[in-house]
Image (spheres, rainbow, N blue to C red):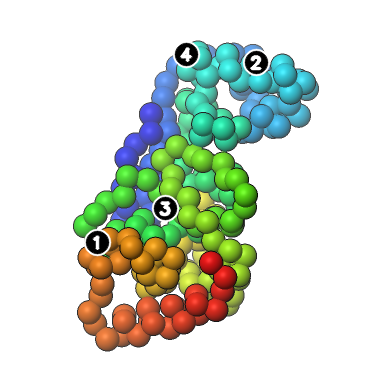
Amino acid sequence: MLHTPAYEDHALASPRIEGDYAGQPKGLSSLPDIFSLSDLCSLSNLSRNSATVAASRWVRAGHIALAGPKAGVYIKTSARSDLLEVIRHVYPSAVVCGQSILHAAKWTDSAPNTVHVAVESRPSLVTLHGVTLHKRSPDWFQIVSFPYRGFRSLDPGPHGIRRLRPEWAYADISFHEPENELFHSCAPTDFVTQHLISVARQKLQTCQK
């Protein structure tokens, strides 16, 4: 079961995927809690067709769950797998952004129903349950990453996923999604924060959307 995301100011508390079942089918116990179809092929010495059949059987039996409609990534339902771990597995460079950050920082009372993450833009993206993806250019990642100006901490935390500073999350919304209601509903009023947002926005304007 996927819990509704809940966030705290000092750290993002990610939803967990959990469940219970008695025993594991042969071949599943040797796999990590989060694995791809390729992992199943290599670790179980199965052909891709055989691995697909096995994974489908395990999904129907409730032993594993798909991370997304066509993600090709599975989660053991017996494990307390964290959604941020799933995101990192599929998108190693993902950055938590948007409403997730603003709610965590108490800039808005509007709690997100999904985890909002920025991922590098590509022709097609793998969608994940409980995740809202925001396409961002390689320039964007370079600007927020060096020299870590857009992150709250140099430490990405236990999940290995960095998160934007609230000022940068707000500036990013105002730049990429000016029609977003959050841009108008949680605008900060203090001078220091407004200045930090202005600096962040100036940096973001130098990158391609």
Q: Would you say 187 lies left or right of 100 here? A: left
Q: Quadrant of residue 20?
A: top left
Earlier sequence position, callout 3 versus callout 1:
1
Please state the horizontal and vertical placement of residue 196, each as a whole percent of the image: 38, 81
Earlier sequence position, callout 2 versus callout 3:
2
Question: SS of the residue at dot 4?
Answer: loop
Label 2 sits on residue:
53
Question: SS of the residue at dot 1?
Answer: loop
Q: Are marks 2 and 1 in contact (CB under 8 Å)?
A: no
Earlier sequence position, callout 4 versus callout 3:
4
Q: CA distance from mark 4 to mark 2?
A: 21 Å
Earlier sequence position, callout 2 versus callout 1:
2
Residue 29 lies, with reference to residue 175, above or below; the image says: above
Three-letter amino acid code at the position of disc 4: Ala
Which numbered disc covers residue 108? 1
Label 4 sits on residue:
22
Three-letter amino acid code at the position of disc 2: Val
Question: SS of the residue at dot 3?
Answer: strand
Closer to the camera: disc 4 or disc 1?
1
Residue in the image at 48% along x and 30% along y: 79
Which numbered disc covers residue 116? 3
Please state the horizontal and vertical placement of residue 113, each as a whole percent of the image: 32, 45
Closer to the camera: disc 4 or disc 3?
3
Three-letter amino acid code at the position of disc 3: His
Question: SS of the residue at dot 2?
Answer: helix
Q: Are marks 4 and 1 in contact (CB under 8 Å)?
A: no
Closer to the camera: disc 4 or disc 2?
2
Residue in the image at 42% along x and 30% along y: 18
